[in-house]
């Protein structure tokens, strides 16, 4: 019977809610406790440096959960580091709404170490690992190197036919002409 579940000295039953003698307010059994609430509060001064933040730090930002934080870190590793804050919008799952929510909490430290792509020594697989290098771009670069030798600088690279100018512009900060 209900007296077995709720001893009279601890709790009394009142129309779907329980009132415990230690509680100051009644609590419905259907209400989640406060410690089960999702994290929606963010410290106003929290700043996340996008090239050094780990997944746990990303998760402290609004709209960023476990999956999205791991995608951000994986994408950053594939890129070799971010050179601009707006590159976060290239990560699958960061739409305009999420980006606007986190924009004031993210920063990019000047002089962050960027991992460079060795343009003259990378093979097809090495080139394709970078998100900005398409299949066509990798093939064109390898064919050019095979027929003309080393690519000396960005001016020579821009003169190669068959390369997408927009993609090449995004890729330029990551290139090393070893």
Image (cartoon, rainbow, N blue to C red):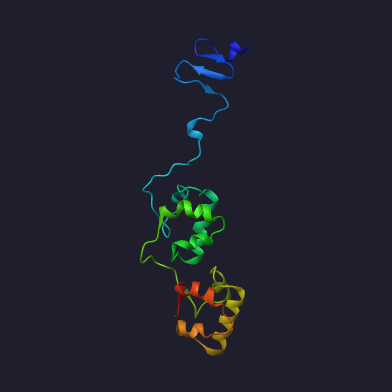
Q: Is residue 110 above or below residue 24?
A: below
Please give the name of the residue rendered at 49% of the width and 63% of the height, measured from the top-left corner: 87
Q: Quadrant of the C terminus?
A: bottom left
Q: Is residue 146 visible?
A: yes
Query: Residue at horizontal 49%, vertical 75%?
Result: 169
Residue 4 in percent (x, y) is at 59, 12
Q: Is residue 113 left or right of residue 59?
A: left
User: 152 or 19, which is in the foreground?
Assistant: 19
Instruction: Locate residue 48: give its quadrant.
Output: bottom left
Residue lying furthest right in this view? 1
Give above or below for 157 relative to 98: below
Q: Is residue 141 left or right of residue 83?
A: right
Closer-to-camera residue (70/160): 160
Q: Is residue 69 visible?
A: no
Q: Is residue 137 placed above or below 54 in the rendered structure?
A: below
The total of numbered circles placed on residues is 0
- The residue furthest bottom is 148
Task: Name the residue at 46% across, 52% down.
Answer: 102
Residue 85 x, y percent position in the rendering: 44, 61
- In the image, taking residue 143 as reference, residue 52 lies left or right, namely left
Q: Position of residue 66 (x, y in %)?
A: 52, 48
Could you tell me residue 123's position as x and y percent? Answer: 55, 77
Instruction: Identify the residue at image location x=55%, y=28%.
Output: 31
Query: Where does the N terminus fall, quadrant-wise?
Result: top right
């Amino acid at each position: 019977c209900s007296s077995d579940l709720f001893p009279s000295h601890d709790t009394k039953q009142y129309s779907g809610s329980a009132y415990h003698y230690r509680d100051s307010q009644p609590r419905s059994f259907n209400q989640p406790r406060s410690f089960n609430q999702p994290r929606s509060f963010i410290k106003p001064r929290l700043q996340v440096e996008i090239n050094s933040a780990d997944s746990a730090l990303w998760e402290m930002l609004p709209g960023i959960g476990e999956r999205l934080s791991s995608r951000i870190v994986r994408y950053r590793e594939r890129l070799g580091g971010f050179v601009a804050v707006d590159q976060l919008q290239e990560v699958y799952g960061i739409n305009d709404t999420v980006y606007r929510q986190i924009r004031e909490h993210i920063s990019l430290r000047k002089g962050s170490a960027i991992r460079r792509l060795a343009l003259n020594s990378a093979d097809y697989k090495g080139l394709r690992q970078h998100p900005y290098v398409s299949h066509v771009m990798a093939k064109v670069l390898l064919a050019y190197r095979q027929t003309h030798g080393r690519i000396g600088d960005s001016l020579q690279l821009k003169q190669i036919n068959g390369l997408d100018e927009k993609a090449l512009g995004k890729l330029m900060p990551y290139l090393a002409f070893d």
